[in-house]
Amino acid sequence: MSEPDIELGKPRDLGDGIHSIAVPFPNNPLGYTLVYVLDSDSGPVLIDTGWNAPEAWQGLNDGLHALGTSVDRLYGVLITHYHPDHSGLNWLVKENSNAWIAMHPADAAQLRLMKEASRGRGGWDADGFRRAGASAEEVKQLADADRGMRVPVPPDREPGDGELIDVPGRKLRALWTPGHTPGHLCYVLEDAGKDGAGRLFTGDHLLPKITPHIALYQFDEPDVDPLTDFLASQTRLTDLGIEEALPAHRKEFHGVADRANEIIAHHEERMDELVALLSETPITLWEATSKLHWRRPWDQMPVFQRRMAAAEAAAHLRTLEVRGQARRTPDDEMLTYIAV
Ligand SMILES: [Zn+2]
Ligand SMILES: [Zn+2]
């Protein structure tokens, strides 16, 4: 836990009929997901739910009780994105309330894919790791991984970009910010903020001090470029004229545009680092990833972190390909890159 004034399960009053509850995120260095509770004329509306674990469910309920309400009185649930630290508890909210659940259609599609993968179809396959250059031992460990996580329930509503959300007595609008996930939504509370400037729920799109994971999870899925989407989604925030961010991790902060610009600069530096690694000799995704600078050195990274790192490097390489600064070798056998 990195924020001294945040206590798990204890709500904080952020003004404008907004409270945050730090819902425990067990076994993760982030410590908690900030779930926001927004007052409306028809009952409280949640923004995100938290990770699917008993202590998280307890924390969410404790927080709601401290606010004089409870899960069964919720009017709706807005999910910023499908990741399980945000949507994980939505099935329990659904079982215990009449609340609708909303999520962007592109993330609803991701949940359907996860459901298929959990039934043993799709998802990671050993050959993808091998082609990316992972060692035989790494391939074995990755392919044997447990996929037995409960998949969050699909949404009842699928708001699109710019849509005004059904929150009676409030003015809340969806802002589509793809990149971290294809259907990531920020939400703009237009009836709040200093001088009516609005307040922005940023999910994982804009976080203080940490940068969200941008990844090509299958390493070479065609026709997608999440990093370019993400950078455009950051630029979008710089044009909003909103000062304050209400993120899903850490804590609220001021300076939306400045933080967005910092995050853009960070990814540009990562791409420069990758370009410097490329030459006329093909390099596998795995080798390229191992040569990048990471907070935890590559040789100390568990294999699952290596997979995440490789997926992140793959997203940056894709953007470089699109920009004409890197090239995949035509060799279909291995996933290798060369300089342009
Ligand atoms: Zn996320
Ligand atoms: Zn998150």
Image (cartoon, rainbow, N blue to C red):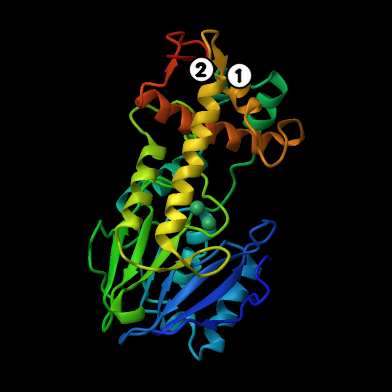
The amino acid beneath tag 2 is: Leu
Nearer to the camera, 5 or 30: 5
- Percent position (x, y) of residue 268? 47, 37
Mark sitting earlier along the chain (1/2) = 1
Residue contact between numbered discs 1 and 2, judged by CB atoms under 8 Å? yes
Specify few, some or many for label 2: CA neighbours under 10 Å numbering under 14, 14-19, or 20 or more.
many
In the displayed structure, would residue 243 be above or below residue 206? below
- Percent position (x, y) of residue 89? 52, 64
Count of marks placed on residues? 2
How far is mark 1 from mark 2, CA to CA?
7 Å
Instruction: Give the residue drawn at x 52%, y 45%.
Output: 213
Q: Could one spot residue 80 in this view of the protein?
A: no
Q: Quadrant of residue 273?
A: top right
Residue ID for mark 2:
335
Q: Quadrant of residue 75?
A: bottom left
Viewport quadrant of the N terminus = bottom right
Q: Quadrant of residue 240?
A: bottom left
- Percent position (x, y) of residue 252? 51, 70
Answer left or right for 50 relative to 153. right
In the displayed structure, would residue 97 be above or below residue 272? below
- Taking the view exactly as shown, the residue that stands out farthest to the left is 163
Viewport quadrant of the C terminus = top left
Instruction: Give the residue drawn at x 42%, y 62%.
Output: 256
Residue ID for mark 1:
133
